[in-house]
Amino acid sequence: MAETIIRQLMSRGEEIATEVTNRLLANEAFVEMLKKGIAAKEIVDKQVADGLKRINVATRKDLSRMEARIAALEAELEAAKAPAPKPKKAPRRKAR
């Protein structure tokens, strides 16, 4: 019973969201403002990226490469720490 009510509420919520979205997208003034907002965000994103590059802040790509390099170095270090295999003992010579 509770699941049925939840499904009905979700369905109604989806209907309302769709109706509101359709009304907004039908409004030319809203669409124009939306386009301007998206364009402004793109400009801000580019300017922020340029600013961070100028002050030499690492990008996500740089950080990913560094993380991969650190992981490789850690693996090398662990391999170097591993005890070397013990050499086989030479058979003892009998005393004369």
Image (tube, rainbow, N blue to C red):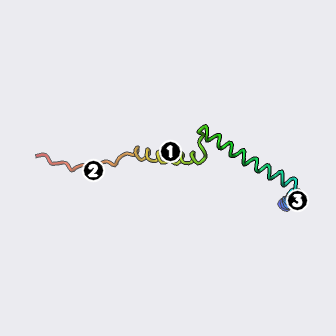
Q: Residue at x 61, y 46 (%)?
A: 60
| Residue 16, percent from left and from top | 88, 58
Regarding mark 1 in the picture, which secondary structure is present there?
Answer: helix
Pointer 2 residue: 88
Q: CA distance from mark 3 to mark 2?
A: 83 Å
Pointer 1 residue: 70
Find residue 15 and report its image quarter.
Answer: bottom right
Label 3 or label 1, whichever lies nearer to me, is: 3
Q: Residue at x 43, y 47 (%)?
A: 76
Regarding mark 2 in the picture, which secondary structure is present there?
Answer: loop
Label 3 or label 2, whichever lies nearer to me, is: 3
Direction from residue 94 to residue 16 in the image, left or right: right
Q: Residue at x 57, y 46 (%)?
A: 62
Find residue 55 and report its image quarter.
Answer: top right
Question: Which of 44 and 24 lies nearest the eye of the viewer?
Answer: 44
Kind of residue sitting beneath label 1: Ile
Q: Check the image and report above or below for 19 versus 55.
A: below
Question: Which of 41 and 19 lies nearest the eye of the viewer?
Answer: 41
